[in-house]
Amino acid sequence: MTYSYTQISQYLRCPRSYRHRYLDGWREKETRAAMLFGRCFEKALGAYFLRQDSAAALFKEWGAYRDTPLEYSNGDNWDRLAHQGVQLLEKLARDDRIRIRQPRRNLQVKLVRSLPNGNGFVAYIDAIGFLDSTSCLLEWKTTTSRYPEEPAGLLSLDPQLVCYSWISGLSEVALVVFVRKRLPEIQYLRTSITEGQCREFGQLVEATAGQIEAGQFLPHSGIRFPQNGCVSCPYLGLCLGNQQLIDVKLIRKPGASDLDWLDQLDD
Ligand code: SF4
């Protein structure tokens, strides 16, 4: 069994949703514009660091969805996202705070780690490079709202960064957040992950894998207003036995765990 950050975090959020996704093969339909745009934008970032025409790369990727009926939120549309993407790429170039040496090697870096019982863990790191001349692991995010920066040190608790520090052995990590808003903004957020956090994350992975292999998939439904996790869960239709909701949101693909790391690109 090969685990990923997406699998572990989905199990921890709700074991029942893990069963729907990884055992029964239910996948969310890919109709969310923000998520698809995020993937296209990351391809454009790759082109930028390879010193290619990043705007052209963005239009090539995002252009494939121009006539696709997608779910847009916050009054977005295809043109607006394209415009924001170009503005963000221009700002990235103006800021000029990130360096990636040997980009073909240091972009989308695949890392694998062995786990007990013959299992493995795989992660795809967006980049390994330098932020303001400090060597670090880099993760890109596209979002419509700024990441919180207070209280100081908050970023060091980000579970995905802890995971990537654990698997890479790199303590310096950074999030580069591309904020799609009226005046697009890039947040450059750096933090350090301790050895103790990595050790605990490894324990969490092993404990979670143990529960998955023991077949424990009890639901962790959200019951408290206003943070009811079920409301935004794509598997709500399955848990409610609501066929209409299932048809709108889900598609069933046997053996659907392939490429699940792409989920990490979600908005
Ligand atoms: S709808 Fe709620 S209980 Fe069902 S899988 Fe999603 S989070 Fe879990």
Image: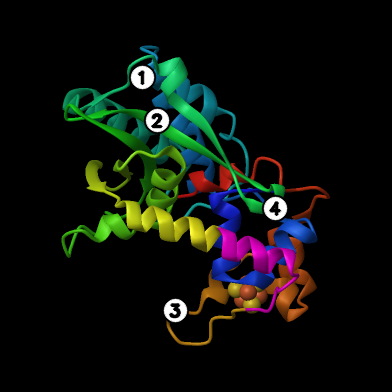
Quadrant where ligand 1 appears: bottom right
Which stretch appears magenta?
206-219
245 above or below 260? below
Q: Mark 1 points at which residue?
A: 49
Label 2 environment density (alpha carbons within 10 Å; few <14, some 14–19, many ≥20) = many
Q: Nearer the viewer, mark 3 or mark 4?
A: 4
146 above or below 136? below
On the image, the x and y values in percent for residue 20 come to: 73, 65
Q: Give the side of residue 112 with respect to residue 43, left or right.
A: right
Q: Residue at x 47, y 24 (%)?
A: 59
Q: Mark 4 points at which residue?
A: 117
Q: Which of marks 2 and 1 is in front?
A: 2
On the image, the x and y values in percent for residue 41 come to: 44, 33
**Of pointers 3 and 4, the one earlier in the residue sequence:** 4
Q: Do the residues labelled 2 and 1 touch (CB within 8 Å)?
A: yes
163 above or below 23? above
Q: Is mark 2 on a helix, strand or loop?
A: strand
Q: Mark 3 points at which residue?
A: 227
Question: Distance between the Cα atoms at labels 3 and 4?
Answer: 37 Å
Q: Nearer the viewer, mark 4 or mark 2?
A: 4
